Image (spheres, rainbow, N blue to C red):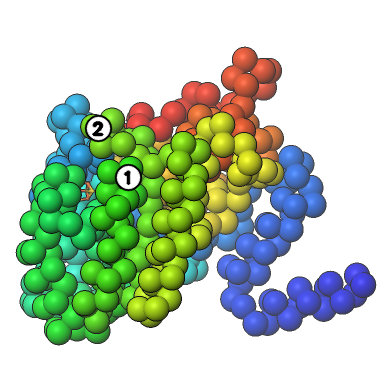
Amino acid sequence: MISRFFFHLLGLWRRTHTRKFLEVLKYLEIKLLKKHASTYCYHTPSHVLIELTTRCNLRCKWCNQANPEWQKKYGHKDMAFADFERIIVQLKGANRLLLYNIGEPLLYKRIFDAIKLAKQYIPEVRLTSNGLLLTADVAKKLQQAGLDMLHISIDSPDPVYMQKIRGADLKKIEENIRIFGETCDIPIEIWVVVSEETLETLKQLPAWASQFKAIKRIRFQLQKGMHSVEITGFNPLASLEVYQAFQRHIDRECKQLGIASNIYELPFYPRGYHQRQAKGICQAPFTQLVSISVRGQINPCCTYGTCDLGNVFELGFKGAWNGDQMRAWRNDMLHQRYCEYCSNWCGYKQHDTSAKGKSVQTVIMPNQGR
Ligand SMILES: C[S@@+](CC[C@H](N)C(=O)[O-])C[C@H]1O[C@@H](n2cnc3c(N)ncnc32)[C@H](O)[C@@H]1O
Ligand code: SF4
Ligand code: SF4
């Protein structure tokens, strides 16, 4: 039995590259040793998200961009290309780079150079855009630079809701998607935030998407409490049957139309929704994804867009990835000391902050320290 296990590990070592092998070892270490596992990671994370700019040409209702305080403080910063150049080399070993966070990446002056450079070190590079700046010329340059997939955010196939939520002209975006599909063969994934108000209209989304040959997948997202707005996020606890019927409808439609979707993977477990409470240790800050803000601050996962766990410009990527703050965060994960955000977003039971034990999460909360 044991020899078969090691034989399997050896096979894995041969078949996959070193990062994957070390990631599997880390996974096993956490599974077996639990809170006694080391907080040190020998591998780069599989996915890295980089925010090249915080500038944006829209002010979508539920985005930080629409928050005047956030806007005044953070809304006009670009990452220096020299800083990007320094960091990207150090990310060799990651599988996927995602270029976005709170901002419109197509506004970044050297976006094509950034993609081209990133492709030398990371096999897959993707970008998330609001779709307004796509032209035939941009499509050609994105293809030449080597972009593997473009994500476009659409919050409803109904132009009235697109105007209400994003302040965007859906017709213009539709035209851009059509031109994009005619000019290059980069696949498109539609990103859509689900809300109570748009739910009915979202039932038409697969049919809407099927008009465009470039759209291959729809990725539904649930609203994070980044900025409070009059449009309500979706709460499956309050309307579970409606939600499940929606899931079935989307799944059926997507299958019929040949479009992939994540409808059965939505990571939404609101506080109190105990039937779906997540258990155990969150692996994300050990293995999966890390995000780097425009100021070089490292965050443990994509949901902590504005949490500061060390600066890659000062410490280098490896220094920050295994820096004191990142390791303290992992220590919290190993001891299952989850903060309110981990509870709301991923369904982990919130740590009792009055309990003894030092917790980095009680000190660093999201939306601070940018
Ligand atoms: C912040 S945007 C940045 C990239 C680009 N500007 C865009 O809109 O696609 C990245 C994604 O986050 C989504 N988003 C914005 N605010 C959100 C919120 N409060 N909760 C969940 N997703 C949100 C957007 O709809 C978009 O799909
Ligand atoms: S969601 Fe994207 S397009 Fe909308 S305001 Fe935020 S960064 Fe800009
Ligand atoms: S929000 Fe917390 S629990 Fe969820 S992926 Fe990030 S670190 Fe893990």
Amino acid type of the residue tagged 2 in the rendering: Val
- In the image shown, does 203 or 329 lie closer to the viewer? 203
Can residue 49 be seen in the rendering of this structure?
A: yes
- 339 to 333, vertically: above or below: above
Q: Is 280 situated left or right of 163 in this image?
A: right
Q: Is mark 1 within 8 Å of ligand 1?
A: no
Residue sticking out furthest to the top: 354
Q: Position of residue 180 (x, y in %)?
A: 15, 77
Residue sticking out furthest to the right: 1
Q: Quadrant of residue 331?
A: top right
Amino acid type of the residue tagged 1 in the rendering: Ser
Q: Which residue is mark 2?
A: 229
Q: Position of residue 335 (x, y in %)?
A: 69, 35
**Residue at 49% of width from left, 44% of height from top?**
240
- In the image shown, does 236 or 241 lie closer to the viewer? 241
Q: Is 174 situated left or right of 221 in this image?
A: left
- In the image shown, does 264 or 219 lie closer to the viewer? 264
Q: Earlier in the sequence, mark 2 or mark 1?
A: 1
- 272 to 252, vertically: above or below: above
Q: Quadrant of residue 359?
A: top right
Q: Secondary structure at mark 1?
A: loop
Q: Which residue is mark 1?
A: 195
Q: Secondary structure at mark 2?
A: loop
